[in-house]
Amino acid sequence: MSTPLKGRTAIVTGAGRGLGRAEALELARLGANVVVNDFGQPGRDGSGAADATPAEQVAQEIRASGGTATAHTGDVTDHQQAAELVQSAVDTYGQLDILVNNAGILRDRMIFSMTEDEWDSVIHVHLKGHYNTTHFAARHWRDRSKTSGAPVYGRIVNTSSEAFLAGSAGQPNYAAAKGGIVGLTTSTALALAKYGVTANVICPRARTRMTEDVFAGFAQPADGLDPLAPEHVAPLVGYLSGPSASHVNGQLLVVHGGMVAIVERPQVRAKFDTEKDAFTYDELDALLTPHYQDRPPNETFAAAEVLGLKHG
């Protein structure tokens, strides 16, 4: 069995269930020491008391299969606890090599019905949670690189969503957070490249506790692997964490059911120049209105469907 991550140490957040669990198991299978992080609240909306059981169970599952893992039950939305998470990996295994950010919650509501708390809580867990761990991992790698005078091995894999790519009417908070994570990732990729660190982001589609409503109408097959199983996503995380992906940086990839799509950065579709010193309303009306009238009203969504993308 290939073990390209042997001797490497990985943190996976939100690893007590669903995608995070599958990713932690895959990284361990590839040889990494894994710090399994999960705050353990039972509600997918972040409700309920924190529980160490999910993280401990996954760590035990890794150890039972011959791997190396420890559990960490800190809250990644807390800046100090995120620092302690990164430090725990360094203290336990000597250094950190891989960070997979996956922790998240859902509080769905249409924009006209959403409360301030529903907005803040989702941004807090997804976007600030990604920032907190990335901040301390980046400091660790920068310091190591400066000490050694050479690039180090560092991999960040962040988790966005097709809700950011194609829109999701009932998830303005979630879509905004996931869009923010893409921006965070590309900025981080540019900032850390000189230290030998890559940062990439995935948009996974999988049947988990977070998406049970989205995929309620898609029955699991009687035989074979569910096309929506998290196990379809985990190998890409393993690849992006590995040595072969050293030249993959600042990339956005969609993954599900045996398919990986590389998403290009936004491109200019059309360009208009004023014939005067500055545009007027009438000139813009004459240029832009015909341009958009000739296009389908939901072209963004139609383009997403070409890739087989749906909201989730």
Image (cartoon, helix red, strand yellow):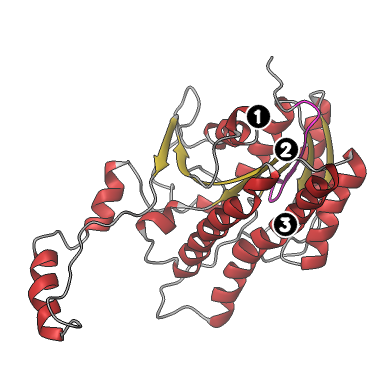
* Foreground of the two, 9 or 64: 9
Residue 13 among magenta residues: yes
Indicate left or right for 208 with 1 as reference: left
Q: Is residue 40 above or below residue 64?
A: below
The answer for how far apart the CA atoms under marks 1 and 3 are is 22 Å
Indicate left or right for 158 with 269 as reference: right
Residue density around tag 3, few if under 14, some if 14–19, many if 20 or more, within 10 Å:
many
Tell me which segment is drawn in magenta: 6-16
Q: Which mark is residue 206?
A: none
Q: What residue sits right under mark 2 in the picture?
A: 153
Judging from the image, what secondary structure is the residue with disc 2 in? Answer: loop
Are discs 2 and 3 less than 8 Å apart at CB? no
Q: What residue sits right under mark 1 in the picture?
A: 243
Residue type beneath disc 3: Thr
Q: What residue sits right under mark 3 in the picture?
A: 133
The quarter of the image holding the N terminus is: top right
Judging from the image, what secondary structure is the residue with disc 1 in? Answer: helix
Residue type beneath disc 1: Pro
* Foreground of the two, 39 or 199: 199
